Amino acid sequence: MALEPLRTQDEKPPRPAAPGKKWIRVTKAVNGIDTEVWEEVSDDTGGPQWGPREQMRLVSRAVPRVDGPDKVTGRAMYSSDMRLPGMVFARVLRSRVPCGTVQLELEAAKAIPGVLAVIALNNGNVDWLGRPIAAVAATTPEIAEDGLRAIVAQYEEQPFAVTPEQAAAENAPKVGSRGNVRTLSKNTDSSEVDDALAKAAKRVQGTWKIPVQHHACLESHGVVVDYRGGDEATVYASTQGTFTIPGDAAGALGLKPNQVTAVVEHMGGGFGSKFQLGIEGDAACRLAKLLARPVHLMLDRATEFHAAGNRSGGEHTLEAGLDEKGQIVAIKGRVTRLGGVGQGSGHPIPYIYGRDAKVFVEDRCIHTHTDSSRAMRGPGHPQASFSMEGLMDECAYASGLDLLEIRRINLPDSRRELYMRQLERCAALIGWDKHAFKNAPDLSKSELKVGIGFAIARWGGGGNGQCKVEVRVAQDGSVEVLSGTQDLGTGTRTYCASIVAEELGLELNQVRPRIGRSTFGSANASGGSTTAPSLSPSVKHAAHNARLALFEKVAPLLGVKPDELEVGLGEIHVAAKPSQKVAWKDACATLGPAGLSAQGEWQAHLASSDVGGAQAAKVQVDTRTGEIKVLEMVAVQNCGLLLNRMSVKSQLQGGMVQALSYGLFEERVIDPDLGLFLNANFEDYKIAGVREIPRMTVEFEDDPRGVIGMAEAAVIPGHSAIANAIRNACGVRIFDMPLTADKVLVGLEALRKKG
Amino acid sequence: MKNFTYVMPTSLEQVVELLPGPRDLKTRDRVKVLAGGQDLLGELKEHLVEPEQVVNLKGVPGLADLRPQASGWQIGALVTLAALEENTSLRASHTMIAEAAGSVGSTQIRNQGTVGGNLCQRPRCWYYRHEQAVCIKKGGAECFAYGGLNKYNAILGGGPSYIVHPSDLAPALVAAGATALIRGKKGERTVELERFFTLPSEGAVTRENVLAPDEVLVRVDVPAMAGWKSTYVKFRERSSYDFALAAVAAALKLDGGKVTEARLVLGGVAPVPWRCEKAEKALVGRKLDAETCRVVGELALEGAEPLAHNAYKLPLAKGLIAKALTKLASA
């Protein structure tokens, strides 16, 4: 398979597809960063088919998730729930300083009764705040904690840069060796765009600031390593990639990868932050190796905030030049990614918009002495959406155009129909026709004001060929579907079972999904919304092969050829004469004691890629207090075949909630002088609670394509729509998230002064 | 948290016996009293205090009594916030107290948290709460919030510490003219609740109230408020659960649309519940119209000195005062 990294503006594949091949857009983790790439895949459309949707019983219907009862009753075993004989608890010590060296004295910690092992985790150089530097294993978590506090860490602190201003200053302390400020884009010639801007009828500009967001997984990062000496180990990991674990763990345990089994029964959230074993997992393996005992190591919440990744922040300075009709003729921008010691995901400006416009974007990153950003749900897109959707509304107001009209004018031809259809549906759902402020914000003096904002999203969401699935049918008629894949809470187990049940004419509860184990068939890591489009075609293929194999066995019983058979509900019958049938149990009884095993691989034609969605938000602003209340959010999304309407709806709602929280609350706060992370807890790092959640309406478009991942598209537009709705409601454009009352009040004051 | 011994005495005599002596200022944190634990547990886990002994008050009979009297209400220190919130006759006579109790934290916190604990809780300032930041509240030399990230800090009464008092109940109880009953080794004493809280410039900067090391808050007495209408209006950044950015406890007596008596106390803006006496006086004799709201708002915030990141608290507090007065005008 050919892989071509996708540049920001790559609308088309790099070259025409070879005969029998086609190009799809997929997301892959490249050096730990989600990157969209074009992938050339087989265009073979033979083999299994999803079939007509109106005939489906389970797939494309709303099915409660099969592991729901386990999760809500606490029966579900998450990695952090694992308890093993002789297990010890470990904790990691993090660096108190952002930059410097540290010398550790471990003896006092080792002397504490119950402390079993203390290890240093790096060579004493610290280059980001909170970097794990030591780990302690003890008989209880409390003693492990005491052990951490007994470690004597002597720091030689060096000047640090924890803010972009500090890092970009003259004579700033160095972050790494690549330079604190790095320009990543190659094009330095903006003359064409400058000319176009100079000739533009109107110019609109602004600088948008985007804080660092945290994944805030409820289950923190960590593993339980079951190693008791010998040449085998099992790692219970909270991970997005079952198969990323054995190789990493084997190195730390001194074993071969095939001697390590990874188990991911249930995991409590990843959002892009859990792709490798990590520093914490590595420490757990080293301690297990040292002690030859099972080790439980999950990060505490403060360490989770300091050292488990984040969504890169950013600063976007954008200027658009418009013609008299409101078409953007030029966009000039400087995009700064703030990924700590990491580079940060690309923020793809100008996000979707800018049809025919001349575009010049300087893309750079500024490094600080803070934890590297990691992929986070829709990497780069929510950031790009925030500034670009804001710019679009400012362009509308500058031109006196309706907020939908400015989008119609500036969407590329290839996407205009899709997004305008979705935007207009959102408008209808949220009451846009009755709204009085379509082309200018409400600047009246009333106390309670209501505004509406819009935003759109796109995502690849294609699959790839990494999944191998097995379907087993036993002599007693029981059915299992096996894949090593992990379920991030997205409903993977449920569609594994429903696809097989649908194919074999069974009820959902007759198929047992078994996943999350590296001894089962390989599967891709869950990144870039690629799990469903990669796994579901493989499941379908395996189920299809199981059905054909069973037909081979059953055909002689009915005196027909295998291809004359079809499944009915709980039976196999002759297609032309359904009364000529064998019940499922009787059919399976023909299998020997070994039963039947069928394999499945990815079928490109059962998946597709490229999703689009639009969202709108209705917001009330209280001008006396600055209170922002989101009254309503609506979403319209396309995403190919819906594997489970109920879980897709949940995905979309979850994305809207996460975006609302990003917009209204979330922000990492580090004191620039002290170098202290001030809100590494769930009190001060605020996340939306139940009272913040508005009425949410979700609609899916009828989309004839195959399965596409849409989880990331869901999280991209919400905060941008809210920011635009605030501006529409009261005239205040908040350029920096989070969108809080204090900024509304300051903005209203500035508007009053301006008159 | 550090290990400690745990005791549950059954009388107040035993409680105060376990506490340090009245002058043991430096060692006072060796013993901590435990009520609902909603603040203390956080302090223990973050190692902000490392007591040798924790004294649970729950074994002392009578501390959780909530008693209506002809003269008002007696509210035991261990009465839960939920009990205050749910008491319908208290809500009728002292609406602002029930509303304040109901605005604290989350349902779980209100079920567990107590009146005494709420009044005696330590600041939420993120510098104070960060173990590594040895600020003036913790015996250090400076208030890091003063020149630092002070969005949530004081605009009134600050210096040398700029915390805001985190209690929601305190402004409402001060507005109600409550008194605090305090028990120490030498016996009981009574303090007006308004005098219970101390500004950092007046009392010990590391404390927020007048309690001596040997003392414990036992009860709050609230006078009857016949003929008064009151309300507590709190602004939270996150309404699901959050401390106040600013809050107003307002109580009024009205006669024919004109104010005859007034109490106005702000929360979330100063190191103590901030009584606005000038504004109270100005309210008397006035109708509750927009102009009154404006004048009262100006007077209430008189002398405010915002820091770099909290000037918004001025319009916010004024807006909340206007909301509270408007609400009372139509109540």
Image: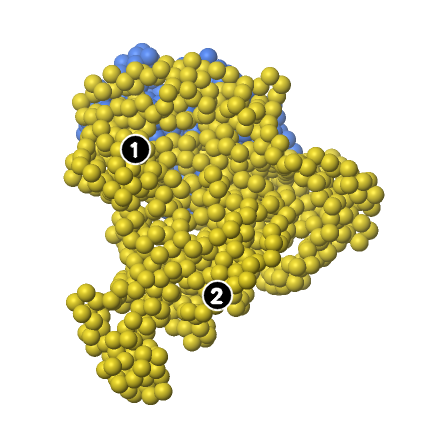
Chain colours: A yellow, B blue
Q: Residue at x 22, y 20 (%)?
A: A110
Question: Few, some or many C-alpha atoms within 10 Å of disc 1 (few <14, some 14-19, many ≥20)?
Answer: some
Position of residue A395 relative to residue B48, above or below, is: below
Position of residue B81 relative to residue A137, above or below, is: below
Q: Quadrant of the N terminus of chain B?
A: top left
Query: Upstream in the sequence, badge 1 or badge 2?
Result: 2
The amino acid pointed to by label 1 is: Ala
Which secondary structure lies at badge 2?
Answer: loop
| Spatial CA span between label 1 and label 2 | 42 Å
Position of residue A687 relative to residue A568, above or below, is: above
> In this orientation, which residue lies closer to the viewer: A8 or A264?
A8
From this viewpoint, is residue A224 visible?
A: no
Residue at which label 1 appears: A252
The circle on residue A409 is none
Mark 1 and mark 2 in contact? Answer it, CB < 8 Å.
Answer: no
On whether disc 1 and disc 2 are found on a single subunit, the reply is: yes
Where is residue A336 shown, x and y percent of the image? 61, 34
Where is residue B140 shown, x and y percent of the image? 43, 14
> Relative to residue A452, is residue A543 drawn left or right?
left
The amino acid pointed to by label 2 is: Asp
> Relative to residue A312, is residue B19 drawn left or right?
left
Residue at which label 2 appears: A44
Which secondary structure lies at badge 1?
Answer: helix
Q: Residue at x 48, y 52 (%)?
A: A1
Q: Residue at x 52, y 49 (%)?
A: A3
Position of residue A593 relative to residue A440, above or below, is: below
